[in-house]
Structure formats: structure tokens, C-alpha cells
Amino acid sequence: MTDIYMDAVSKLKHFIESDLSQYAKDRNYDYGIDKRNNVSMLSKFISHRIISEYYIVEKVLEKYKLTKAEKYIQEVFWRVYWKGWLEHRPDVWNDYVGFNTSSMNKKDLEQAYKGTTNIDCFNDWVNELKTTNYLHNHTRMWFASIWIFTLGLPWQLGANFFMHHLYDGDPASNTLSWRWVAGLQTVGKNYLATSSNIAKYTAGKYRPNNIIEHAEPLTSSKIYNVNELDFSNFRSNNDNLLVFDSNLDFQFINHCKDRYKKIYFVLLLNDHRKIALSERVISFKKALIDDISSKFDQSIILNGDDCITLLDSDKTFDIIYPSIGENLSFINLYKKSDKTNFVYNESDLACWKFSKKGFFNFKKNIPDIIKKLNSNGDLFT
């Protein structure tokens, strides 16, 4: 059986040694599924924290100075920033998953889902998404722009479509990126795909002549208050640890494993999700959990129903905080406050305090964040 964790570590090492030096220059090009060395292709591991953002930054800086790898490190930190931004505004997630689809034109939606629109590049990307469970980041932006402004479909359903098929589907990055394209994230500033931009960055493969290149951003009357985060770590005496697929941080779990008699790994199936995942995505998540759990003698794998039963027992639990998304919604619904204790990654807490505003504010603090990450131990040191 493939050691997925070691495979991820190996892929990171290869990217750093062979391809990272060209990343800033080449990253926006989508050369197709047979030429992906201009990007790291690590997103499916990072989104589940098989390897964490902080581990990646650490390894990159072992070879490069920050100024030489700044663009890649910024892109890695975008993921942390998105998580923090959403933590400060949890109602953004709640409103997204609560979107009412009853008024939709089902024919237009089905054509988009099936890739049978009159836009060839979009149709090809639908097929690529379904068959590879991945799209290049730049292509995701084009795809979302066409979905929203050319096809006139709700951004929420496009975000659902991505979550359904992407191996690297991440609640924060996916939700907020779709909002950004729509013009809701940075209010009044949307992203519009253009034929010339698509042609340039697909090396001439596509040049669609039937997409909307000028449109007003979407608007919303909803104003989201910024919540202050009251997260801190408490050293409990709990004997059991709960881990969800969104935070399978091997290094973190390995560091604290001796504190626990049992480590329970939880994979929610679609009966406990508001956004249904494809069989391939569920199988991928299962493979990740199988791999990480196999490294710990005291591990047990649970589905949602098993987890509910366990939470109703007399056991007490530490829970590695899964961040806003399906897993957190689930655990908040069924946990008993007197029997459970969230454990937070101290590096997340250090970063999230800079995530209240736009990324520019976060970005200017990256050098100081890195110094803090290098000097501080984690909860269990």
C-alpha cells in the first residue's frame, strides 16, 4: 500500500529542488494535465493537512531565502488566511450552505454539470474536473467567471460543484474564492475571464469568443460582522483524541500521540454532509485516513453514526479543531461541552489574528509570522 504521507513529503522535496525556482514566472499557465511541473500539485495533501502549510514553509526556507520564494510562500499562506478570515465570519459559511436552489433553471444547470454548453473550453474543464478531480488555479478562476457571468448560474452551486469533485476541496478557500470572482469578497471588484487571457495562459489551446468579458459584480445587502476569536489551548486530562479528515496533520498527531489511549479518525459520509461529495472524493478521503491512522497503534476509524454514538458515551475527548466547514458543523451539533475540548494549532492562532481584513494586511506580516513560527513550540512541547 502506498504511504501517502511519505509520497506527499517526497513530492514537496522534488518540487522544491526542481521546480520552485520557476514558480513565480510560470505558475499562471495551464499547460494541461500532462505538464503540471509549474505548480506544486500538493493541494490535495495540504487541504487535508497531510502536510501542513507551516511544514511546507519550513522546508522551502531550508533551501531558499524568503525573498527568493516569496510568491510561493504567499500562495501557501493564502490558505491559512482564508481559513482565518472565515473563522472571523462563520455566517458566510452558514449562508453559503443554506442557499435555496428551488428557483433554478434546471436545464441550464444540467448543461453546465454535464459540460454540454456552447463554450468548448468550459466543457473540457468540466470533463477534466470529473476525471482528474483537479483544475489548475487559474482555470478555476476562468471557470467560475464563466459559470457566474456567462452562464448566469448561482456562485453557490458552482462552489458546490467544485466541492463535489475536487480532491483538494477546502471549505474556506473554495467558498471565498468563488465569492471573490463574483465580486462579493472584495466588494465591487469581480474577476472576469477574457478570451485573450485564456489564450495566453493556455498557450493558445483555447480562445473562446462567446464569453461575457464585461459585467457588473454581484451585490448583496448582507453585512457580516467580524467576530473576535476566543481560541486558546487548555491542557485537559482527556484520554481520547478525535481527528477529522480536514486536519490529518501527521506531525502534530505524532507529537501528541502518547497523551491518548485512543485516537479516533472520523470520515463523514454524505448522510452527514450538506454538500454531497462524489464517490471518488469520499474514497480519496478514506485512503488518506487509512494511511495516517495506520501509523498509530491506538487508532480507530469511525463514520458519522459511529462518532455520534461515541460522543454519547461517558468518554471525554480532545478534538483537533477541524476549522469551519462540514466537520465543525457536525461536531458542534453532537459534542457535549462538558466532555469535549478543542485543540488548536498554535501556528493557526498566530496567523488568524492577521486575517480580519484583506490579504494585503496579512501579507505584510508574513516575515514576522515566520519568525514567530520558527521560535515558538506547539501546544505539546
Image: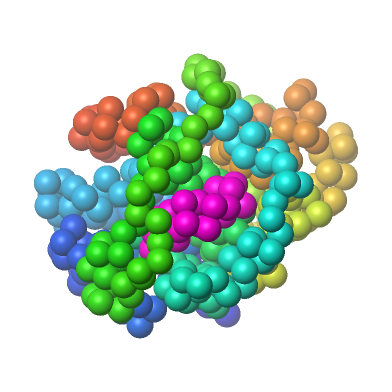
Give left or right: position of 225 versus 192: right
Residue shown at 62% from the left, 69% from the top: 111
Taking the image as shown, residue 328 lies to the left or right of residue 208, namely: right
| Quadrant of the image containing the C terminus | top left
Q: Total marks drawn?
A: 0
Q: Give x and y (percent) for residue 108.
A: 63, 62
The stretch drawn in magenta includes residue 147: yes
In this view, 27 is above or below 14: above
Where does the magenta region start and end? 139-158
Look at 43% across and 54% down and name the residue there. 145
User: Which residue is at 40% across, 66% downward?
Assistant: 210
Q: Is residue 346 above or below residue 72?
A: above
Magenta stretch contains residue 4: no
Horizontal and vertical percent position of residue 237? 67, 29
- In this view, the residue in front, 121 or 244, is 121
Q: Is residue 95 above or below residue 356?
A: below
Query: Magenta-highlighted stretch: main secondary structure?
Result: helix
Residue 355 lies left or right of residue 26; in this view the side is right
In front here: 209 or 157? Answer: 209
- The residue under the point 21% across, 50% down is 71
For the N terminus, give its image quadrant: bottom right
Q: Residue 343, how many percent across, how many down? A: 57, 33
Hey, which quadrant is residue 354 in on the image? top left
Q: Is residue 320 visible?
A: no
Left or right of 341, for residue 48: left
